[in-house]
Amino acid sequence: MSEKTVVESIKENVRRQNDSWRFVMGREVLTKDEVLKRLDNDKGFRKSLVKMVLELSFDILARKPES
Amino acid sequence: MWLVVRPVFDDVTEITFNEAQDVIDYFIEKGVAYIDLGKEDAVREKVEKVLFENPEVNVHHADHGSEDKIWGNDNRPVIDLANVELLRGRAIHNNNCSSAKKLGVEAWKRGCLAFWGYTEVIYFTTDALEEFKEAMNYGLKRRVDGFSWSECLQKTKERMTELIDALVKAGKALAASCLRLDRDSLVCYNSEPPQSGCVFRRLAIRLFGPEVGWKLRESLKKYTRN
């Protein structure tokens, strides 16, 4: 799966949020439109969001089944 | 007794202020004494005064943090490396960004009983504020229930994992991703000593243990001075 596909999935998720939705990173508060814009224009931001989402997948995959 | 420090000066601190209210409500429910320094009262002089006058008081800080300081209501830190000594013999529970990175290490070196906090910036999304509030306050509530700091850390990480799973199931994958990051940067310097990125420091910690290894430079300075 390419980075482009992951970014598209993230964008799809963000587009589904309502207009009052905010993404908060410390002091930085981004609206839905700002997140979408930065996913297009800010390579560092895009990479960190892709990493964040992939790490969640790895985290879930690495879990041992509950006994 | 707990001192709750909760400034409000932007959108994020509106949220952390309300999260701190949840802690206060729990203190009231459990009969725990507390002092509330909220909004304009959450400034350095007032925090220092309470700490000087109440040697047994522990601290809950809900606001912005940086690697070496935690902030007050007036754009000045309430605790930084200049007054970190005030944390000696106390516990501090932080709902703020990054303060465990440097301030926490310094506090631990100076005898802070427990420094609970995050080594990185805290991430969250507003579609899961209840879940984030529960995660941020869970450890302190378990402490009030009588668990050791080590148990509180373990229970909090377990609860955060449950919340992550619930968020994934609810279709809130971005919120779940944020909470996973927060979970992994949560530390408590008491149940575990700070970890170092420095090779020499890590070697010193391995050779002499965390108590000596973290304070080797200070000990050497003292030794060469004498």
Image (spheres, rainbow, N blue to C red):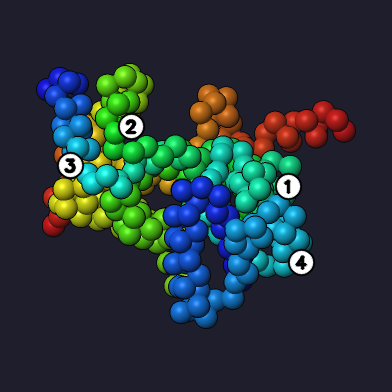
Q: CA distance from mark 1 to mark 2?
A: 38 Å
Dots 3 and 1 on the same chain: no
Q: CA distance from mark 4 to mark 3?
A: 52 Å
The residue identified by callout 4 is B53
Dots 1 and 4 on the same chain: yes
Dots 3 and 2 on the same chain: yes
The residue identified by callout 1 is B83
* Lateral position of residue B169 relative to residue B202, left or right: left
User: Badge 2, how many Cα within 10 Å: few under 14, some, many 20+?
Assistant: few
Of circles 4 and 3, the one toward us is 3
Residue toward you, B187 or B166: B166
The type of residue carrying mark 3 is: Arg
Query: In the rendered structure, the residue with mark 4 lies on which chain?
Result: B
Of circles 3 and 1, the one toward us is 3
Q: CA distance from mark 1 to mark 4?
A: 15 Å
**Spot occupied by residue B85 in the image (x, y as percentages of width and height):** 72, 49
Q: Is residue A4 above or below residue B209?
A: above
**Spot occupied by residue B171 in the image (x, y as percentages of width and height):** 16, 48
Using the rendered view, name the quadrant where residue B181 is placed. top left
Query: In the rendered structure, the residue with mark 2 lies on which chain?
Result: A
Of circles 4 and 2, the one toward us is 2
**Which element carries disc 2, helix, strand or loop?**
helix
